Amino acid sequence: MAEISSDSVGKYLKHHPEFLEHFLIENVGLEELQKWVIRRLGSRKELESNENKNIDKMTPYCVYSDKRQMLEELSQSIRLHSKGKHVLWELIACISTAVGADGFRLYLNDNSPDDLQLSLYVGEKVGKTIIEKVDRKQALIPYHVAETRQPVRISKGDTDPRFPDGLPAKGEMAHLMCQAVQHPDGKLVGVVEFWRRSCTWKFFEQEEELVYSYLVWGGVALHYADCFTTMEKQKKLNDFLLVVVRSMFQDMVSMDTLMTKIMNFAQRLVNADRASLFLVDTKKQEVYATLFDVGADNAMQDKSQEIRFPIGKGIAGYVAETGEVVNVVNAYQDPRFNNSIDKLTGYKTESILCMPIFIKDVVIGVVQMVNKLTGSFTTEDEEAFETFAVYCGLALHHAKLFDKIKKSEHKYKVALEVLSYHNSCTEDEVNRCMEMDIQKAVDDIDNFFFCPYVLSDFEKAAHTVYMFIDLFGLERFDKTTIIRFTLTVKKNYRRVPYHNWGHGFSVANTMYTIIKKAPDIFRQNERLALFVGCLCHDLDHRGKTNKFLLDTESPLSAIYSTSTMEHHHFNQTVTILQQEGHNIFSKLSSTEYKQLLSLVKHCILATDLALFFPNKSKLEELVDTQTFSWSKLEHRLLISAVSMTSADLSASAKPWEIQEKTVKVIFEEFYIQGDAEKEAGRKPIPMMDRTRADYQASCQVDFIKGICIPCYKLLNRLIPETEPMLLKCEENLKTWETIMECYKKLEQSVPILKDYVKQKKINL
């Protein structure tokens, strides 16, 4: 068979055009035909000869012979992948094919308000995208187009004063066409860059017009794609807020629970690593938090330590003061940032989004999100949280009202309980006490070693009246009112083994003795507050510790979170004073009355042993540094507090017979609480376990060594007249230590005895 030459094929096709047409339609793809047409229209020879006068008219029809198919494919892509970046990528890919470009680059505007920033966007496959920032040196032409919004066409070797370095050397790039992509409102979206190799042809004006026409349509498509994305985000936010509202309002348990939920939701909303919620205390002009730093694992810091700082301090304080949103990309470059927490925890704070929570245009709280997990916090995060904050404000306001209602309910329950148990003294009791010769006291009532067990409960009341009149006289007080107040106080002590009326009388008697032995130490109203405080310091005591009340969720613990029983004792004192015929301070001026009530409260709260240690530490420092001054109120308050503790613990400074008897009733009260804990399924501490009676001696040794003796030593340094209490306490300590050693020897001998019995086969 003879070889067919290209000339013979060419001659055949010229003489048989119908065969050529049929062959092309059946065997050549549309894109390939398009490229042939573009090359034909764009050939330098054809343009120079200017033979084709209708090139402008032919271009729109020949550049892309099937626009419908392209637009249908693009519309389908938009429907499946509605994100603006992907829509733009698909559009430009179609345009690149339409103009026969060998490749393209898409630069996106970072929307920087102060400085134009472009990022190279590569997104050939959905879900696999790369965005990297480029500077002006790397993309001089795209930056020029972005700023001027004017298209650029340039080829290798062209001289252009705008670009003295010519075409950037990027691989095979020989011809370049660059155009801006804009929204219908003129906002810059980015810049598209088409290029061709040196073996092909340069870009012409017709192609530039074609790209422009497509980009105009693309701008509209982008606008609606952005609208769709916004609607999708809003729908997700609405769904999120619906979950938030349902969770916040349907499961309203406590303020702490709500605050934890707010922090968790805020953290999820903006994808933050940590979140903190600070509430605003308008009275003290402080910002505080009891729950903070909810991390990605919902870990919560110890809520027992409350954080407080002034409004205006730190970023959270600044937001609380101004009500402004603060979005910090680099926390350590912001002068408002306080890095003390980072130093303590070792955690590195980088980005911060701090938002206010309003109720009636007043900032009631601040939520601070720390370290966005992906990048930094955006304006979208701010907008989303602004809506979220409205619901937070409503929820917090609702929670505060809820807490007030619950507190009122608890107070109501406590009031009913108290009223059902207690009542005031009768007039018969008052008359009976009036008829007694209360001017005559029993022997040694002003002695530190006085035994309260020699008096009946009624006699204790009568002698309390005696001590009151002996200390303060009747010039400013009414005798009948003193009697009525004392008898009602007696009735308001419960019949528990230790914290009963007998204990209240004994503590008041010790304070009476201190005042009698050192009459010039305290001022008149201070002496009065100390005596009344001792008399009332355990009113309505239930024989249970503050911790027990907290663990069992007692209504009292819901009202008073700290010094639970001590606050209740003071409130009971005020309640008695407010009853008709009971106000022993009625003849005092209103100023004296307020001052006295404040001092009584201070004295009663001081009997909480949790407060003794900080009081002792402060007073000890003043004494050691010789800076204590009786003329300073705060110093006298400290010695008053320590004096209250010494009177409260005076059973440890009584003669051994009284000490031993008192310890028995103390431990009986402990055991009753231990029994209640066992019934509730909890294991009591050994001190409150009646099966561990051997623990009494060691417990007393620790108690006297750790609390009583340090208290009496400090008191003796300022009030030397109290030395007998210290000496007797030290004497009792030695006795308890002897008993403890006996218990230890007994414990050691028991196994030996058991072994002996086993060996000798003794039947016990």
Image: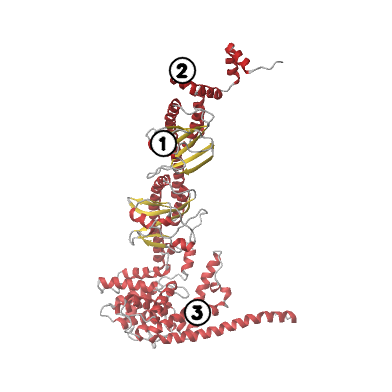
Q: Earlier in the sequence, mark 3 or mark 1?
A: 1
Q: Are marks 1 and 2 in contact (CB under 8 Å)?
A: no
Crowdedness of circle 1 by 10 Å Cα count: few (<14), some, many (20+)?
many
Q: Earlier in the sequence, mark 3 or mark 2?
A: 2
Q: Nearer the observer, disc 3 or disc 1?
A: 1
Can residue 252 be seen by looking at this rendering? Answer: no
Which residue corresponds to mark 3? 663
At label 3, counting other C-alpha atoms closer than 10 Å, the crowd grade (few under 14, some 14-19, many 20 or more) is some
Residue type at mark 1? Val
For the C terminus, the quadrant is bottom right
Left of 27 or right of it: where is 163?
Answer: left
Q: Is residue 428 left or right of residue 495?
A: left
Instruction: Name the residue nearer the viewer: 111 or 432.
Output: 111
Pointers 3 and 1 in contact (CB under 8 A)? Answer: no
Residue highlighted by disc 1: 145
Establish if 723 lies above or below 345.
below
Q: Position of residue 423 (x, y in %)?
A: 37, 69
Say if mark 3 contacts mark 2, CB within 8 Å. no
Label 3 sits on a secondary structure element that is: helix
Residue 444 locus on image (x, y percent): 39, 88
Tell me which amino acid carries mark 2: Asn
Distance, label 3 to label 2, CA atoms, is 120 Å
Residue topped by disc 2:
52
Q: What x and y, as percent, mark residue 618?
A: 40, 76
| SS state under label 1 | helix
